[in-house]
Image (cartoon, rainbow, N blue to C red):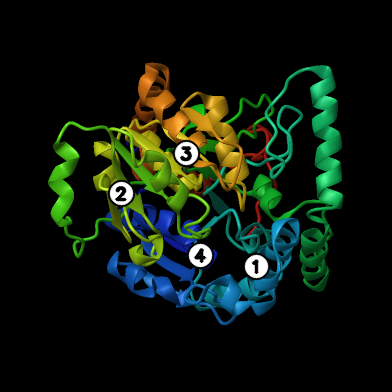
Amino acid sequence: MTAPCPTPARILFATTPADGHTVPALPIARALVERGHRVRWYAGSKYADRIRAIGAEYVPMSDHDFSLIGLDEYFPARKELSGLAKLKFDMVVGFSEPTRTHLADLSAALEREPADLVVGDTGMGAGPMLTELGGPPFAALGISVVGFPSDDVPPFGVGLGPTTTLLGSLRNRLLHTLVRRTLFAGMTRAVNQIRIDHGLPTRDEIVFEYMLHAALYLQLGAKGFEYPQRDLPGHVRFVGPVRPEPLDSWTEPEWWADLGAGTPVVVLNQGTVATDPAELLQPGLAALADEDVLVVAVTGGRDPRDLGALPANARVERFIPFDRLLPLADVLVTNAGFGAVQLALAAGVPIVAAGKTEDKIEVAARVGRSGVGINLRTQRPRPDAISAAVRQVLGDNRFRRRAAELQSEISAAGREHGAVDELEKLLCQRRKGVQLDPLTEQQPVPRVG
């Protein structure tokens, strides 16, 4: 642990109003509060009580707070979309247009009380823009795969692997240009209009690439899980996934002792966003019904009765804390949510991944590329494909050994405490007047704010 800054800092968190963007920041904010820092948090109303419970002050959103009802209810037109059309809609309406509200709300919060640092997730494009407008430095939390443009790595969303050949680098550059001008063009236009209205120059960047201009980028995952990237920005720090906040209200189900009976435990996880049980839960239960395993299925909130009759070797719950369940598991079968995959690796558990929506196509691709499991390359896997993959992972120790290597890496990275160490290091540098270009860590940049 690094030495703390001599005096407490004033830190303003700002997170997109969705579980995957806000919940991972809770342990980091708690650790900052425990070290004596003053923490305020601009977030969706769904998280107000949890924010106050860790000792931080809750700052509400004036608009675009879809945390309680979700994107489909907040934006009814989204229900009629699918595939790329839905992704484009989300990029514009869910991430870009709310930037105007976020900028106004955060500016008002800073007028009421200044801050030494703003910390936010990669969807909070208002954070780096605040710095441009004279606000405090911004530190980003990487809550999905590293998605910075690179000659070594294809653009986010295409699901292709890395390459370092001359031809591969050319392919990647062309794909980055193509994706930026097509898939993410609406996102860029929407944010650039906001920039123009605030007197800022336009940028040929998508919102997530604004994190290139953050003072610090804390990747909440294992470095060994990501694609190798020779041009990775110097301000990126891999700290590993945070430990989930303890839930005192949760109690073990009656069948919990079955986990210690010696039968291999397969956790089947649907996630909390793409929750259609026909995609993974139902084919997974069917696939493993005749296998000599204990299946623990987690619905992500859906009623277990939606799954119909259950096999004798299955146990189903709406929710189980993964920090309690995964250390007892032998395989995680998942739709490739980034958080679930990283928590599995923190427990040394190999993975079978089947997901293609949101960021899941990229997460699943890295599951296969990193050697920690098998990528089924589909959103709706066949039962025979699931059973074959589970048998392969259980029968080949290379998957578990590789997962154990990343488990050791995550432990050494410090997780939420490592994140706080890096934030305090940044604060101390700023107080001493040391400011580095986030892309090189060498050339000084003009002080803003």
- x, y (%) of residue 84? 74, 56
- x, y (%) of residue 357? 62, 52
Which residue has dot 4 on it? 18
Please tell me which of labels 3 and 1 falls first in the chain.
1
Please tell me which of labels 1 and 4 falls first in the chain.
4
Which quadrant: the N terminus? top left
Q: Distance between the residues labelled 3 and 1?
A: 24 Å
From the viewer's perspective, tell me whether residue 35 is left or right of residue 85.
left
- Is residue 346 among what the camera can see? yes
From the viewer's perspective, tell me whether residue 329 is left or right of residue 421.
left
Front residue of this view, candidates 291 and 200: 291
Please tell me which of labels 3 and 2 falls first in the chain.
3
Which residue has dot 3 on it? 221
Q: Distance between the residues labelled 3 and 2?
A: 34 Å
Element type at mark 2: loop
Q: In which quarter of the image is residue 53?
A: bottom left
